[in-house]
Amino acid sequence: MLSNRSFALRMVLWSLLRRRSRLLVALTGVTIGATVLLGLVTLCYDIPKQLSREFRSYGANMVFVKDQVGGRLTHGDLESVRETLPADRLVGLTPFRYEPVHNNMLPYTAVGTYFADVRLTSPFWRVTGEFPSEPGQILLGAEVAEATKLQAGQRISIEGRNTNQDRYSKDFTITGTVSTGGVEDAFIYLSLTDMEEMTREPGHIDLVEASLTSGGTPLGDLADLVRRNVPDIEPRLVTRVTRSEDTVLTKLTWLVYLVTVVVLTLTMICVTTTMMTVVMERRKEIGLKKALGAENKKVAREFLAEGLMLGVLGGLIGSLTGLLFARLVSYSVFGRGLNPEFHLVPLTVLVSALVTVVASLWPVKKAMEVEPALVLKGE
Amino acid sequence: MLNPEISPDRILVISDVSKIYGPIKALQNVSLSVGSGEWLAIMGPSGSGKTTLMNIIGCLDSPTSGRVLLDGLGLDSLSSAELTAIRRESIGLIFQQFHLVSYLTALENVMVAQYYHSLVDEKEALEALENVGLADRAKHLPRQLSGGEQQRVCIARALINHPKLLLADEPTGNLDETNEAMVMDILHSLHKRGSTIIVVTHALEVAAHAERTLVLEHGRVASDVRNQPYQK
């Protein structure tokens, strides 16, 4: 046997389904609101990640040195740092070793590094020719190439003395030149393995550069983590990068929040207006129900239930379109997709339902003021 | 001595009732009593106060002065919520415009009255539709029904909660002759079964079905006469 609750539900459902044109108008408003809401919140989640990847093109945002003046890091320190930093945020970790060398009696600085890692932490390097890929190959800074008049394919002789003042000398094949417009232009780059063999002093590293994405634990806290976990190491933030990154991300996030609040407000106004129209159109029905003896709270419940169903339905549809919207924006702005934040769907449905119900309160209050006598008068 | 105002055979007693809207005196010192099981027709030209009187009897409005007793209960001092409760429990309303809920079927329109009254009972609602000859139209929406059928659904809805008083406002005003006859037959049958009926109408031929006719003019009772027993 049909219960009163089932009948009330049936009434609300028929009211929505058998008045489809009205339902569509109201549903469109709620759906657009939910679409923009979920789309923006998804972008709020994703923009820092996307921009963070973009910021990585500016180079490392954290460097590690020995905390004693003149002290040097080891390969063990490098591995400890790699293990301490979160793997999902670590774009690259590159060791650098600096040695004073000579060529044709002129002093230069040779830098030993791993070129595969350099590509990750310093994507801004403009290399003419190629990165060294085999032992015995070398990359010249643009200024060095200019001074020595050497170019890719030619050979260069590097000589120097190690810490024991033992002389060393080795010939390398030039694979290309690097130009950054910065200090890199004045260096000679070779693989760290070659440098260790050439100096006959393995195991030393002067500096480690790390490139980390934003989001989650702040970089400062990660630096503290490394400081605690790896003895005698001093992590430093590259403030010109991290500060501009933080500033842009913070401003952008606030902008998106602001737009979200504006959209929510507009949605609420839209739904209130729609519900007001619905109430005005259904004054006769409300009057009739009251004339039949309906208590105000029962009529109010029916309208709020309609609002709730609209909110839930609009929230569900809007969640799907919102995810698509965010994906489209991400593709068109950043040129890559994003991971759909499915956990935001229930939240969007909840907010959508809440906004619709709250927006229905004023129209429902007006509905309660309808005089049933109007029905008898035929007005 | 028993107060005649609360005599058990008087379902409605109206004493010296006036209703004033600003400068307009819609009703002036109207007195009237209706016996249980009686069929009264209220007639009068437009603006004579018929609808105002109907609204007061139907607990949709309150008088400015005077007393209204419905089944022994004074209506003049009741709150809006209490009047709603009396409407729900004691009065069945039949409208000229039928006023069915457009998105509900004939059966659901009858069940709406049950829902607001107490508990829905689909079987009983279907029986009510059977009684007005509409069992086969139970699943139809109002727009799929003729005017006469819609009015019969309206009657079934008015009767479903077994009201003490049936109030009909121009019940045949929008119907053709065939449907008018059908509706009047239903009212006769209800009257025979003891229902108290008050019909507001412009039409003499509709009023002639009643046992008694009250004529209003300028908000006052112009006449209150017993009709000849109706004969087809």
Image (tube, coloured by chain):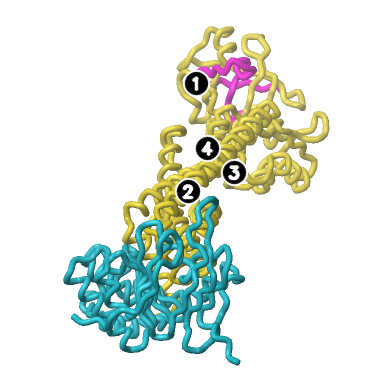
Chain colours: A yellow, B cyan
Give the SS element for disc 1.
strand
Quick check: marks 2 and 4 in contact, CB under 8 Å? no
Q: Nearer the viewer, residue B95 or B71?
A: B71
In the drawing, what numbered circle is on residue A271? 2
**Camera-nearest residue between A334 and A239:** A334
Name the residue beneath numbered marker 3: A89
- Examine the image and state in which quarter residue A195 appears: top right
Q: Earlier in the sequence, mark 1 or mark 4?
A: 4
Q: How many marks?
A: 4
Q: Give the percent coordinates (x, y) of residue A155.
A: 51, 16
Rendering coords of residue A374 (x, y %): 43, 58
Lateral position of residue A258 relative to residue A98, left or right:
left
Badge 2 marks a residue whose secondary structure is: helix
Mark 4, residue position: A50
How far apart marks 3 and 1 lie (CA) works out to: 26 Å
Q: Where is residue A201 in the image (x, y as percent from the top left)?
A: 69, 32
> Which residue is under mark 1?
A127
Is the residue at mark 3 from the same chain as the one at mark 4? yes
Answer yes or no: are tags 3 and 1 on the same subunit.
yes
Q: Which amino acid does label 4 sit on?
A: Gln
Residue at mark 2 shares a chain with residue at mark 3 = yes
Compare marks 2 and 3 and give the one earlier in the sequence: 3
Under mark 3, the amino acid is Arg
Q: Quadrant of the N terminus of chain A?
A: bottom left
Q: Are marks 1 and 4 on the same chain?
A: yes
Q: Can residue A180 be seen in this view?
A: yes
Q: Which of A258 and B102 is in front in this view?
A: B102
Q: Residue furthest bottom?
A: B1
